[in-house]
Image: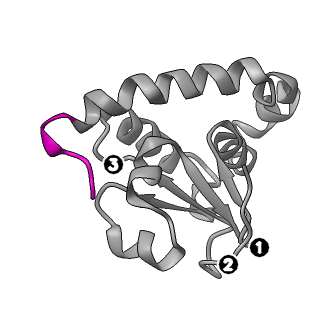
Amino acid sequence: MTLTTAPTSADATLEVFYDGGCPACRREMAHYRTQPGAETIRFTDGAHDLARLAEVGLDPMAAIATLHARDAVGTWHIGVPAFREIWVRLPRYAPWARRFAWVIDSRVLAWAYAVFCKLRLPRRCRDDRCPT
C-alpha cells in the first residue's frame, strides 16, 4: 500500500515508524541505527511519539501494527516494502536487498509478515498497553 503526502524532513531520505513498545522491534531498529547509512533514516517510535504521528496523519494503532516508512517525496511504504526502503539505504544491506528483491517482493514474505503482525499485536496490546 502506498500513500503520497508532503515530505517530513530535509535531513533524512526516509522516516521509519516502528512499534517502540515491542522488544523485538526496538532491537531491530537499534541494530539498523548502528549501521553505516543510518544517518539518512529518521527512526520514530510509533508507540510513544503520538505528536509526530498526528503531524504525518498516521493512526497510532496502524503505526504499531506494522512497519511504516515515508520517503523524502512523501510516499508511504507499509509492511515488507518499508523494510526494503530501510535496507536499500544501508550499504551493508543494499546488495542483499537488490540481489533478493524477488524474495522481498514476494507475496509469501508479505503474507508471513502479516501473520507475524497479527499474532504479535494482540499479545502486545493486552493490559491496555497500546496507544489509543
Relative height, residue 40 to residue 35 (above, below)? below
Q: Residue at x 32, y 38 (%)?
A: 22
Q: Which residue is mark 2?
A: 7
The magenta stretch spans which residues?
Answer: 126-132
Badge 1 is on which residue?
73
Q: Nearer the viewer, residue 56 or 18?
A: 56
Q: Residue 71 placed where, x, y %?
A: 70, 64
Residue 113 screen position, x and y as percent: 58, 26
Q: What residue lies at 49% left-to-right and 50% top-to-bottom?
A: 33
Q: Amino acid at mark 3?
A: Gly
Kind of residue at disc 2: Pro
Q: Which residue is mark 3?
A: 20
Give the side of residue 88 with respect to residue 28, left or right.
right
Q: Residue at x 69, y 22 (%)?
A: 109
Q: How many marks?
A: 3
Ranked by sequence position, the earlier of labels 2 and 1 is 2
- Indicate the position of residue 55 as horizontal and vertical percent values: 47, 79
Around disc 2, counting alpha carbons within 10 Å, would you say few (fewer than 14), some (14 to 19), or many (20 or more)?
Answer: some
Q: Is 102 in front, or is 111?
A: 111
Specify whether 72 is left or right of 69: right
Q: Residue 130 lies in magenta, yes or no?
A: yes
The reply to whether dot 2 and dot 1 touch (C-beta < 8 Å) is yes
Q: What is the quadrant of residue 103 in the picture?
A: top right
